[in-house]
Image (cartoon, grey):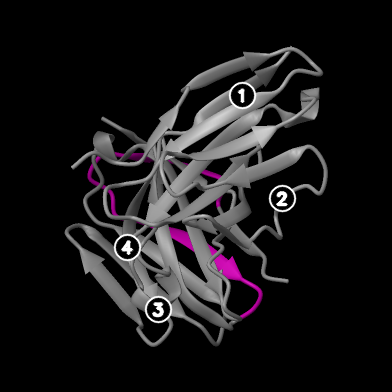
Amino acid sequence: KQEVTQIPAALSVPEGENLVLNCSFTDSAIYNLQWFRQDPGKGLTSLLLIQSSQREQTSGRLNASLDKSSGRSTLYIAASQPGDSATYLCAATPQGGSEKLVFGKGTKLTVNP
Amino acid sequence: NAGVMQNPRHLVRRRGQEARLRCSPMKGHSHVYWYRQLPEEGLKFMVYLQKENIIDESGMPKERFSAEFPKEGPSILRIQQVVRGDSAAYFCASSPTATVYSNQPQHFGDGTRLSIL
């Protein structure tokens, strides 16, 4: 059974700092690994999707990496801004024909001006 | 293009009543997924539907919960005889194809917050 863990649960940084969010998963048999952003009272916004055959994906100030063998993914945010404050979720799609996403509990990020 | 639309945004029910949650997928999307987010917990998969078919309901409680996605109209998640433990945020997502083959992300709605008195 796939389990996804995110550390830390909460993170507070000053504006401008570069930061890394961590995600680990127990079963390396995945189709892909996704990172989402969730704002309070809102749904999820997809940030990056890394296919199982890929090592990383980049979008603007965001870079996500995937190491299937060690069961880890990281989301790197460069030059953080107060608008980046949100909860960041990672989710794995297990292999086996399933469409379900298995989510971690998220990291709540606060970027202080 | 309108995103995934869920209504109502907030729903209050008394114990024993029925709750009906609606989800209109993005235009052109025929695959719908329902997830539940309990307080202080991560999102948990409930059910995956294509038009008129339930593909995977492995995350759905065996009793009181049902889902449908008719040929016409929104997908409906129905909870009968609600209990306090059903209080949660229920999210719907949609995609144009099976995401594992296309590697396209699922697009999420803003959720329905269900409160049971």
Question: Label 4 neighbourhood size at 10 Å, few (<14), some (14-19), many (20+)?
Answer: many
Q: Distance between the residues labelled 2 and 3?
A: 24 Å
The x, y position of residue A62, in whole percent, is 26, 59
Look at label 3 and name its amino acid.
Tyr
Report the front residue among B39 and B70: B70
| Magenta-colored segment: predominant secondary structure | strand
Residue B33 is inside the magenta segment: no
Identify the secondary structure beneath mark 1: strand
Give amino acid for label 2. Met
Secondary structure beneath dot 4 equals strand
Residue indicated by mark 2: B60
Is disc 3 in contact with disc 4, using a CB cutoff of under 8 Å? no
| Extent of the magenta region | A8-27
Q: Earlier in the sequence, mark 2 or mark 3?
A: 2
User: Does the CB distance between marks 4 and 2 fall below 8 Å?
Assistant: no
Q: Do the residues at discs 2 and 1 belong to one chain? A: yes
**Quadrant (top left/top right/bottom left/bottom right) for the C terminus of chain B:** top right
Q: Viewer-nearest of labels 4 and 2?
A: 2
Report, in whole angstroms, how far the alpha carbon at label 1 lies from the one at label 4. Answer: 29 Å
Q: Please say if A104 is above or below B10.
A: below
How many angstroms separate mark 3 from mark 4 (CA)? 17 Å
Q: Alpha-carbon distance for marks 3 and 1?
A: 33 Å
Q: Residue at x 57, y 80 (%)?
A: A95
Residue located at (35% from left, 84% from top): A54
Label 3 secondary element: helix
Give the label on residue B101, or none.
Answer: 3
**Disc 2 to disc 1: CB gap under 8 Å:** no
Asked if marks 3 and 4 fall on the same chain, the answer is no
Where is residue A48 drawn, in percent x and y?
32, 63
